[in-house]
Structures are given as C-alpha cells and as structure tokens.
Image (tube, helix red, strand yellow):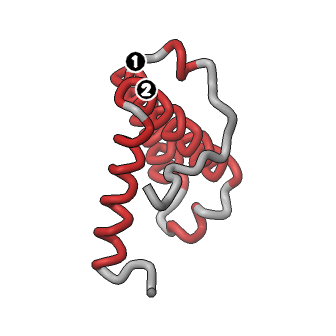
Amino acid sequence: MADFLPVYNFPPTKFVKENSLGDQLDHVMSEDLEVLEIVQMKYEDLEEACKDDHLLEEMVDKTQSLETFWRIMEKKHGQEYVQGLFAKVKDKCRAKGYYGD
C-alpha cells in the first residue's frame, strides 16, 4: 500500500484489548450523541458552537474513540484491510475533487 493509513494521533487505549468492534462502535455513537446534545442545548449558530471548548474536547474524544475502533479492526481483520478501506475512501474523494489536486 503506497499510503500508510490510518495515521493515529493518540497512543492505543486499553479498550483496544478490552472492547469488541460492536462495543467500540457503540462508544463512537455515544460520542456523536454528546456532541449533538451540546449543540442542540446551547447553539443555533454552528460557527458559535465551534468556539465552545467543551464541544471541541468532545470532538477530540470522538477522534480518539474512532482511532480505537480502527485499531480493533486492524487486530481483527489486519492492517492491510483497514488501509484498503482508507485508500478506497481517499480515491473516491479524490475523484470527486475534494482534495483540490
């Protein structure tokens, strides 16, 4: 694989060893709900919401939770499988002109 995807920002959490893929997907979705709740309770203007440190920290939590999901996926199905998924999405986005290259 030409690109070494995904690139992780955080060290592995203990949940890579403890959680199933389903458990971790549930956790990712709970992070989504936390972000949604903050926005719905406090903001009509999404640009304003993006100045809220609590909201931004939840977005970072979501990133870490997703990284944990992909690490579990690598453990279950191999790094090449996960890299292939990322490469397919990258290729689709490039074809749609999302990267501007």
Relative to 4, 55 lies left or right: right
**Residue 50, percent from left and from top:** 60, 63
Residue that label 2 marks: 24
Figure check: 2 above or below 29? below
Number of marks present in the image shown: 2
In the rendered structure, find residue 20 and report the number of the disc placed on it: 1
Figure check: 89 above or below 33? below
Alpha carbon distance from label 1 to label 2: 6 Å
Quadrant in the picture for residue 23? top left
Figure check: 88 above or below 99? above
Amino acid tagged 1: Ser
Residues at badges 1 and 2 in contact (C-beta under 8 Å)?
Answer: yes
Residue at 55% in and 45% down: 63
**Residue 24, percent from left and from top:** 43, 26
Amino acid tagged 2: Gln
Query: Can you say which quadrant of the picture contains the N terminus?
Result: bottom left
